[in-house]
Image: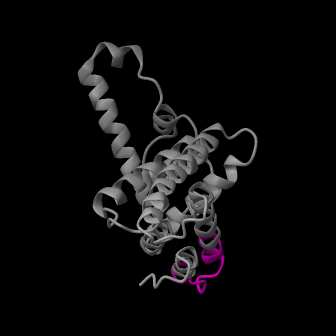
Amino acid sequence: MAAPSDDETRSPGRYAKGIARRQEILDKAIEVFAKRGSKRTSLRAIAQEVGVTHAALTHYFGSLEELLVAVYRESERRNDTEHPEPSGLSPAMMMRVSAEENRNIPGLVQLYSTLVASALEEGHPAAYEFATQRFSRLREQMAERVRELQASGEIRDDLDAVLVSSLVIAASDGLQTQWLLDPSVDHEAALEMLDALLAGGRDSR
């Protein structure tokens, strides 16, 4: 979010209104992107779709890339709140559950893929920060879960936990891309098979 103006800093009430206004714009933007994905367009065109001025979007989000990051992060936060992750799942099954939920919002799946692709190019600091932080967080969370499952005998103990996490993330993201291009690709079934392979033949069901 853009830094508050001097007037907003001096007036708590005005600053609070600014926060509320930003959230209102973000709510509308999420609805738009959930339907349209991240089709290449300008911030001005998005402003028109959202129903606000170009100046308003620029004030609250700075750039199109920053808006895309904010939209995805808020959508992910809402999904985590509304659909808490079942406990005890392996990393592959965690990603499988996420894949099932993502089928209902293909536009946001496309948005995520666009942000990751942008992060690989120069001149996209917001996308780079988003992608690197997200991958780092997921690797840490999943590695900890892998170690727990290795201790209980549910995942092979001869595997490096961090590498397992990296592999699961790579498989899920790659399958997600294939699904965007060809909806017949069974993302969930492939992750379930990967789970069985990591378990060394354990019946993942």
User: Magenta residues: mostly which secondary structure?
Assistant: helix
Q: Is residue 179 left or right of residue 4?
A: right
Q: Is residue 179 magenta?
A: yes
What is the residue that sits farthest to the left in this orientation? 13
Position of 84 with respect to 173 (left or right) is: left
- Position of 143 with respect to 16 (left or right) is right
Q: Is residue 102 magenta?
A: no
Expressed as whole percent of the image width and height from the top left, the position of residue 172 reads 58, 68
In the depicted structure, whether residue 68 falls above or below residue 193: above
Residue drawn at 28 percent across, 23 percent down: 14
Q: Percent position (x, y) of residue 197?
A: 58, 78
Q: Nearer the viewer, residue 58 or 65?
A: 65
Horizontal and vertical percent for residue 38?
A: 58, 59
The single residue placed furthest to the right in the displayed view is 122
Is residue 36 among the parts visible in the rendering? no
Total numbered labels placed on residues in the image: 0
Q: Which residues are magenta?
A: 176-189
